[in-house]
Image: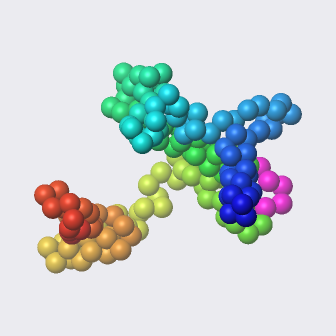
């Protein structure tokens, strides 16, 4: 009895969080969890878990003609990008930003200030472009390429660790 009570206490906030009310411009609207909203309860999960978890989505959505694939993950990603955009935009309009909020606002503004970016043109890159232009030998060019790799610019080649295409249990360079 004690375990089922504890389970209920833990489960109630979880299920309440899945169906949140969001206040947007003083209007209270329902914001339903995308994953829970697309569960097909007519299918038993122990019979066919894929159709249980995704069945309603599959039945009610088609892949748009301009997309190679389309699923709940795209909606979750879109929702996340909208939330991040709002955080960044709000950080730039804050009248007294400090700490992380100031850094977020400054970073966002520096990328969105297209007027200044266009006015500067390639001038901020001129020192790096001059170094490339100054390289006259193969060794100097290779040294410049290696320096650019430190900045994360994959010139000549790029490397990284990924799952091997022929042996899925191997991570290869």
Lateral position of residue 75 relative to residue 138, left or right: right
Lateral position of residue 41 relative to residue 160, left or right: right
Image point (20%, 60%), residue name: 168
**Dividing the image into 4 quarters, which one contains the N terminus?**
bottom right
Q: Position of residue 152 (x, y in %)?
A: 36, 67
Q: Position of residue 66 (x, y in %)?
A: 37, 25
Q: Main secondary structure of the magenta part?
A: loop
Q: Is residue 20 magenta?
A: no
Lateral position of residue 62 relative to residue 30, left or right: left
Point out the stretch of residues depicted in magenta.
92-97
Q: Position of residue 165 (x, y in %)?
A: 17, 56
Lateral position of residue 123 relative to residue 28, left or right: left
Image point (86%, 34%), residue name: 26
**Dividing the image into 4 quarters, which one contains the C terminus?**
bottom left
Residue 158 appearing in the image? no
Q: Nearer the viewer, residue 132 or 89?
A: 89
């Amino acid at each position: 009895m004690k375990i089922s009570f504890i389970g209920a206490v833990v489960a109630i906030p979880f299920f309440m969080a899945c169906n949140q009310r969001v206040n947007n411009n003083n209007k209270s609207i329902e914001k339903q969890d995308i994953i829970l909203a697309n569960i097909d309860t007519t299918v038993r999960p122990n019979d066919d878990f894929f159709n249980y978890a995704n069945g309603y989505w599959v039945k009610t959505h088609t892949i748009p003609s301009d997309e190679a694939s389309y699923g709940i993950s795209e909606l979750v990603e879109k929702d996340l990008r909208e939330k991040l955009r709002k955080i960044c935009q709000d950080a730039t309009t804050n009248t007294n930003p400090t700490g992380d909020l100031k850094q977020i606002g400054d970073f966002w503004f520096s990328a969105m200030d297209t007027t200044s970016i266009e006015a500067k043109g390639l001038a901020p890159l001129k020192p790096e472009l001059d170094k490339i232009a100054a390289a006259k030998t193969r060794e100097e060019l290779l040294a410049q390429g290696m320096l650019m790799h430190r900045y994360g610019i994959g010139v000549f080649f790029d490397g990284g660790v990924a799952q091997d295409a022929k042996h899925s249990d191997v991570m290869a360079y």
